[in-house]
Image (cartoon, rainbow, N blue to C red):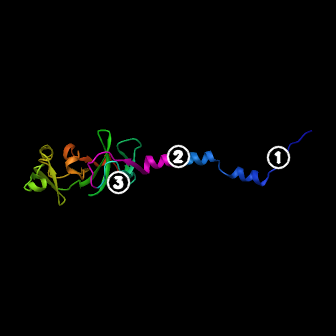
Amino acid sequence: MSESFSQDTPDSRKSARRPSVALIVCAGIALGVFLKLFVVDFLHVSGRSMVPSIQDGETIVVSKLRYGIVMPYGDKLLLRWSEPCRGDVVIYLYENKQVVKRCVAVGGDSLSVSRSADNDLFGEFGYTLEVCGSRIPLNETQFKNLSGVSSVPEGYVLAVGDNYGESLDSRNYGFVPVYNILGKVLCK
């Protein structure tokens, strides 16, 4: 009768307890995918609408958890626990593109539009939007879009690019629903 015995050596016991390289790599990839989908994102900015704050070609860091849990590859939050504040630089989808703009007013904030009296400051625009102590230039189309509106509706924000002359923003396409805001820019 033949018997076989396996002998436990200190080296064989250590290797049995040590995670394999493949397991560590898989766990790292899974963690990276989880962080990218739900926690933080790095986005490349294309365009000059946020100059001088964010330059064309810069990479920005976006917190996806600042306002809630974003639906992966979606355009809305699954769960919201916070809303944007005035001054936040936010990310949202407009025409299936991620857009970065500054939140200049939130739901309930008053606004007024008028013909500009200051041609030196707003010469090419001709009209102004006054909101939360700021004066933002408007062209004729933007003036018509916002005429008759006295406040930002609840559940919406007024999102405007810092480079007024080169920004397509809420002055053109209207208020942004809070539930469409996907994250807050942390740094560049």
Cα–Cα span, label 2 and label 1? 36 Å
Q: Nearer the viewer, residue 51 or 169?
A: 51
- Which label lies toward us, 3 or 1? 3
- Which label lies toward us, 3 or 2? 3
What residue is rendered at 56% in x and 48% in y? 27
What residue is rendered at 35% in x and 54% in y? 185
Q: Which residue is mark 3?
A: 185
Badge 2 marks a residue whose secondary structure is helix
Queried whether the magenta region covers residue 33, the answer comes back as: yes
Q: For the residue carrying disc 2, how many other residues have a C-alpha within 10 Å: few (<14), some (14-19), or many (20+)?
A: few
Which numbered dot is residue 40?
none
Q: Nearer the viewer, residue 151 or 14?
A: 14
Cα–Cα span, label 3 and label 1? 59 Å
What residue is rendered at 48% in x and 47% in y? 34
Where is residue 187 shown, x and y percent of the image?
37, 56
Badge 1 marks a residue whose secondary structure is loop
Q: Which residue is mark 2?
A: 30
Which numbered disc, 3 or 1, marks the residue that appears first in the sequence?
1
For the magenta stretch, what is the residue range? 31-52
Q: Which residue is mark 1?
A: 6
